[in-house]
Image (cartoon, coloured by chain):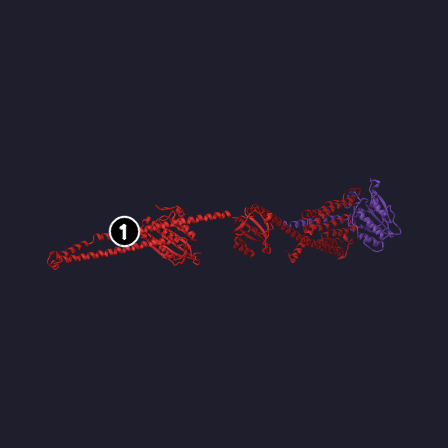
Chain colours: A red, B purple
Amino acid sequence: MTTKLDQDGQVTERTATLLKERLDSDHKRIDHMFAWLMAVQWLAGVAAALWISPRAWEGEFSHTHIHVWVALFLGGTISGFPIFMALTRPGATLTRHVIAVGQMLSCGLLIHLTGGRIESHFQYFGALAFLAFYRDWRVLLTATVVAATDHFVRGMYWPQSIFGVLVASWWRWLEHAGWIVFEDVFLVLAIRQTLREMLGVAERQAKLETVNEMIERTVNERTSELRREIAERARAEESLRLLGSAVEQSKEAILITDAELQRPGPRILFVNPAFTNMTGYTAEEAIGQTPRILQGPRTDKTVLNRLRHNLQRGESFAGEGINYRKDGTEFNLEWQIAPIRDPGAKVTHFVAIERDITERKRAQEELENIHKQLLEASRRDGMAEIASNVLHNVGNVLNSVNISTNLIAERVRKSKIPGLAKVVDLLEQHAHDLGDFITLDSRGKHLPAHVRDLSECLTADQRAMIGELESLRRNVEHIKEIVAMQQSYATASGVKELINVVELVEDGICINDEGLLRHGVEVVREFEQVPPMNVEKHKILQILVNLLSNAKYACEESQRADKRVTVRVANDEGRAIISVTDNGVGIPLENLTRIFNHGFTTRKGGHGFGLHSGALAAKEMGGALCVHSDGPGHGAIFTLELPCPTQEHPNG
Amino acid sequence: MKKYLPWLSALIWLAAVGSGMGVLWVYDHTPGGDAGVPSQWPARSKMHLASDQPTLIMFAHPKCACTRASIGELAVLMTHCQNRVKAIVVFLRPKGTREDWLHTDLWRSAEAIPGVTAQADEGGGESRNFHVTTSGHVVLYDVDGKLLFSGGITSARGHFGDNAGRSDIVQWLHHENAGTETPVFGCSLLNPVQASNSNTIVCTP
């Protein structure tokens, strides 16, 4: 918005510009006028010379009078330069001063040519009046100076030519010049008055232009705004048309209601064809009704309460539920409702987008069933894997049991007990002379030493067998523990319980302990304290057993001496991180991306579902199973991340 | 340099105009010849000297444009001095010229002045009697035939306005002593041959 100060400054500046333009234009116009006038004066001078003094006489002879040549050439010179200036430099300051001088000189020449008649002096006043057209007092000054100088010089050196007397007073030229000045005074006053009027006109025009400019600017701004508004309206209309078309063509049911939430509830104002297809209600039947016509006995009241609560607070709603068609059949729907607000943020309408999800629900249920079946199968597969490991370990222990049994049998078979029986028979044979036999008989003399040796042997056998029996007992106890552990995990399917992660990991290692030991794999434990977790522990155990078994095979395959498996448990901001790192053969990059695929395996005799079921189980628990390997020969890291929902109820 | 070119041109123009003006001034202010007007009324003159008042004679070329100013000044003079002088304008009619030679606007102007008589000078005899060679030359004789004044009554060639000659004559006619001579500006009454024979100066351009 232009301020008044700016406008005043603008008007002043514009006024000066307009005045200057007007004066420049006038100066040019008057220059051209004087060009014509000077030409006419020249021709008039020539004509006057031809008329007044065409010829000079000498008796009866005559020739062209010098006035004719003077009028032609001197007059041409006097007029020519001002005409040239007026045509080539119109409007220039010098031009009008040259014209002023030329005018005065023309006057002088014409006075000469007219015989110096006193009446011809009036040309000066006429010329000055013409020069006043310039509205420039300086031009009058120049003309006056030229005329005064002419009178002064001629008065000084040839007074009779101008004053008609041989001796004139020194101030006589001043008298003549005074009359010119006298006229100048009036002309200057007139010029000032004219300039004042021109200034007023220019000022009025500048104000008018400023006002016009403001009006024009306002009109332009308003026009631009209107254009923008029209364009925006056109765009809005186009958007509306597209939106309307989209709504009409939409496969989703769309209905718009008013915002009246009091009973009987918001009135339906608009429904699209998809609504009719979904519910059976035509637009005519639905409009004016409330959406309650779609509700029925199995419509979830909880969802409706949440819907009402959200709408009363002006919030959006999204949910699923059961509605009823016009023919009374049920259908599942998913719907979203959003408030529509006016510029004052007041809710004026609600728009609902509804989708029939009956088929999707059915498919989802089927999918869930299949998923459960898959999970169960996976679990069974996992259990089979664990069972296989258990049996493998049990088999190892049974080997020890077998060895122990064989050792005991060998000991028993090689026992000195038959020697003891021979001693007993010998003693019974010499029961009547046992003293003589021991002291006198050669065999009896060796009998005590033999009994002592036999005793020592039997004692040694007893110790050995006790040791073997103890080993046997431990092995049997180990088998018992493994079987009991398998039984405990097998029976825990689907049941969550609060577990200690480190203990669970130890169980996993324990199950693989024999195999790891047998293959010379060192197990390194790096455990941090992790909060108790509420999980299905058999799933974690299933994953751990599988990971440790894989690590064992990877180490064995590498045939390196320092086979090592590092098991880490860490707490990472509320997530339990269990990683199994081996320094085995590693995994090529191309296998990393499909290692969790069902049926993928690189191990001879592998099934390819251990890691797959492990990944599924991890995902089911809200965690993830990841793998990292720097390539063949660099080992691999399998990481199981699990959330720690300790606040959840075990059966929740 | 280009900036000052208009000013330089203006100065050259002023110089050219000044030179032209100078030439014109020289011409306008160059008087005609004076062969010595007789101090007594020439006896050979066929004109009559007035006995009751001075006699003024203006010799004029009927076609001289410059003399128009002299006739005008004579009219002014006669206005001031009516009934104080007998005025005659003698118009030259060279030999061999037609009758209408004399019938010009100057003749008619002279005749129109009250108290002035116009008459022809056939063959220029009267001019020669008074030794006058320049058109516009005025001579004033008193009743005794004594020359009071001889000269022109314009300040320059063909220029109207107050001038010393007219002033002197007015003074003489008011019985005051005044100047007796002024330069005469006008065309020659003699043709070039006559002029060269009379060894007089002719006011030719």
| Residue A385 seen from this side | yes
Picture quarter with the C terminus of chain A: bottom left
Pointer 1 local density, CA inside 10 Å: few below 14, some 14–19, many at least 20: few
Given residues A370 and B186, the one toward you in this image is: A370
Given residues A35 and A22, the one toward you in this image is: A22
Q: What amino acid is labelled 1 in the image? A: Asn
Relative image position of residue B74 (x, y in whole percent): 83, 50
Given residues A388 and A622, the one toward you in this image is: A388
Relative image position of residue A623 (x, y in whole percent): 42, 53
**Label 1 sits on residue:** A402
* Residue sticking out furthest to the front: A432
* Residue sticking out furthest to the left: A440
- The image shows residue B96, relative to residue A482, as above or below, that is above
Given residues B9 and A182, the one toward you in this image is: A182
Q: Residue at image x 89%, y 52%?
A: B52
- Please give the count of numbered marks on the rendered protein: 1
The secondary structure type at the circle numbered 1 is: helix
| Residue B147 seen from this side | no
Relative image position of residue A525 (x, y in whole percent): 35, 56
Q: Is residue B81 left or right of residue A345?
A: right
The chain containing the residue under callout 1 comes to A
- Residue B199, by quadrant, is top right
Q: Is residue A301 left or right of residue A476?
A: right
Relative image position of residue A187 (x, y in whole percent): 74, 55
Picture quarter with the N terminus of chain A: bottom right
